[in-house]
Amino acid sequence: MARETKMEKVYPSDEAVRYTVDVYESFGWEVVGNQKITDNTGGYEGADGNYYTTTETYIQLTFSREKSSPWYAKVKELEEKYYDVKGEAAYHANTRPEKPKLGFGVILTFTPLFPLGIYFIISFFAKKKKYNGEIGGWLLKNDAVQANAKKDMARLKEEARALVEA
């Protein structure tokens, strides 16, 4: 009997661990180990001459599932769809239009290049007007994308859980 194993780093909170375990269990994974890890990942010398280290604390969960289970192929397919939907939602959330910045134009108005500064300030207001028009539509679309993704992810999880528990 062949088993597959997967490890997952999780933020060290009970809620994050419970959520991760629930998702994995929906797709037939069993928790076979957990470990709290504190990782000192090198360091650097600050401008003040002190030496600082970077520390990361997380829970490492180890999951395993049987590849010869009768539901394995269908559940693996549902799991792939689940993560595709999750990835698409995350991608869309990161496509927010960029808010225009005014700073450079204001700085130039206090130099001999002030006409260029005035140009940047005027173009800032044109960009801001365009941004205000785009952001409203993006927010509505993003809300719809996130709501549909949440609904689809829940459906895929429940469908997989039903196959695993049957």
Image (cartoon, rainbow, N blue to C red):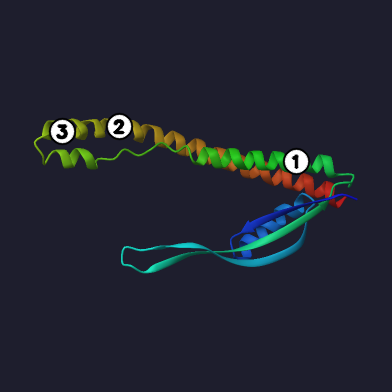
What type is the residue that disc 3 sits on? Ile
Residue drawn at (75%, 48%) of the image:
158
The residue wearing badge 2 is 127
**Crowding at label 2, few (<14), some or many (≥20) Cα neighbours within 10 Å?**
some
Marks 1 and 2, how far apart in space? Answer: 43 Å
Residue drawn at (71%, 56%) of the image:
22
Q: Determine the secondary structure under disc 2.
A: helix
* Cβ atoms at labels 1 and 2 below 8 Å apart: no
In this view, the residue farthest toward the left is: 112
What type is the residue that disc 2 sits on? Lys
Task: Kindly report which numbered mark, 2 or 3, lies closer to the viewer in this rendering.
Answer: 3
Q: Earlier in the sequence, mark 1 or mark 3?
A: 1
Residue drawn at (12%, 34%) of the image:
113
Rendered image: mark on residue 118: 3
Q: Determine the secondary structure under disc 1.
A: helix
Q: Is residue 97 left or right of residue 31?
A: left
Name the one closer to the observer, 100 or 134: 100
The residue wearing badge 1 is 78
Residue 46 sits in which quadrant? bottom left
